[in-house]
Image: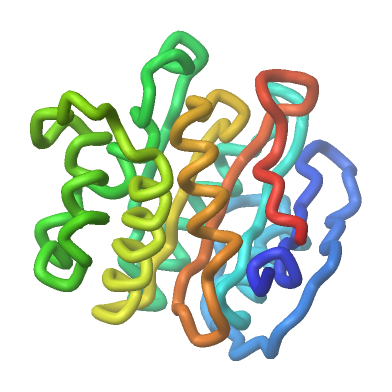
Amino acid sequence: PMVAERHQTIVAGPGADVALLVGGGSVRGLEGSSAIVGRDDEAKALRRWVGGGRPALLEIVGEAGLGKTTLWEEGLRLAREAGSLVIECRPVEVEISVAYGGLASLLEPVLDLVRDELPRPRLHALEAALRLREVRNSGLDETAVALGALSAVRAVAELRPVLLALEDVQWLDASSRVALTYALRHLREGDDVGVLVTRRVGAGDGPLDLRG
C-alpha cells in the first residue's frame, strides 16, 4: 500500500535518535521556526514530513511522559500553517470498548462536507456505524463501513489537504481500527492525506498495521 511505503517513525525521548524509517516521497519543505524548545532534530523531522509526499503516515513512539504529545501538537500546528484540514482523535483506555468511537471523532465533523459525494450504501452504513441513523434489522455492514470511511477520507482530501491526527492510537477501539486501517491501506498516489499518530510502547493494541 502507498501509505505503508511512506510510513515513518520518530522515537520520542530525551537523547533518543530521530528514526525516520521506510521513508519515501519528495519533500517540498516548510520554512519557519518551531514552537518546541530543545528538540531541534524532532522539529526538523516533523517539518520535513509535513512538507513531504502524500499519502503518508508518521508515528511518534515512546514511553509515557517523554513528550510524544508535544511533538504531535507541533505537527498539527505545522500542518495547519501549511493549509491542511486537521481532524483530531484522542482515544483513551476507558473508551476502547466503544465501537466506532474513534471513527466518529474523525469523520462525523466532516461528513456533511462530502455527504453528496459518497455512494448511498456506503454513506448509510457509515451513518449507521456513527449512530447517525438507525441500524437495520439485518445488522451493520462492516465492509460498507470500511468502504465508506475510505470514500469519505478521499472526498474530504479532494476539497483540501487532510491530516488525520490520532493521539494514543493504542487505545483506538477495534471497530475503528479495522475501518481506518482498511481506508489507509487503500489510499492511492495523489490522495492528499497525512496521518500523524502517537503510540505508547507496551500498551494497548499496538500500531496500525498498514503492510501489504
Q: How many numbered marks does the figure carry?
A: 0
Pick the quarter of the image with the N terminus. Answer: bottom right
Asked which quadrant contains residue 154, the reply is bottom left
Q: Nearer the viewer, residue 15 or 190?
A: 190
Asked which quadrant contains residue 206, the reply is top right
Residue at 41 percent across and 77 percent down: it is: 82
In the rendered image, is residue 35 in sight?
A: no
Q: 136 left or right of 48?
A: left
Residue at 69 percent across and 22 percent down: it is: 64
> Percent x, y for residue 84?
36, 71
Q: Nearer the viewer, residue 128 or 108?
A: 128
Pick the quarter of the image with the C terminus. Answer: bottom right
Residue at 47 percent across and 44 percent down: it is: 179
Q: Nearer the viewer, residue 113 or 37?
A: 113
Q: 134 left or right of 151?
A: left
In the rendered image, is residue 178 in sight?
A: yes
Q: Is residue 182 above or below residue 168?
A: below
Asked which quadrant contains residue 111, the reply is bottom left
Residue pushed farthest top? Answer: 94
Q: Is residue 39 above or below residue 48?
A: above
Residue pushed farthest front? Answer: 138
Q: Is residue 60 above or below residue 167?
A: below
Q: Is residue 208 above or below residue 47?
A: above
Scheme of colours in the image: rainbow
> Percent x, y for residue 29?
60, 86
> Percent x, y for residue 81?
38, 72
> Percent x, y for residue 28?
60, 90
Q: Nearer the viewer, residue 104 or 182?
A: 182
Residue at 46 percent across and 50 percent down: it is: 165
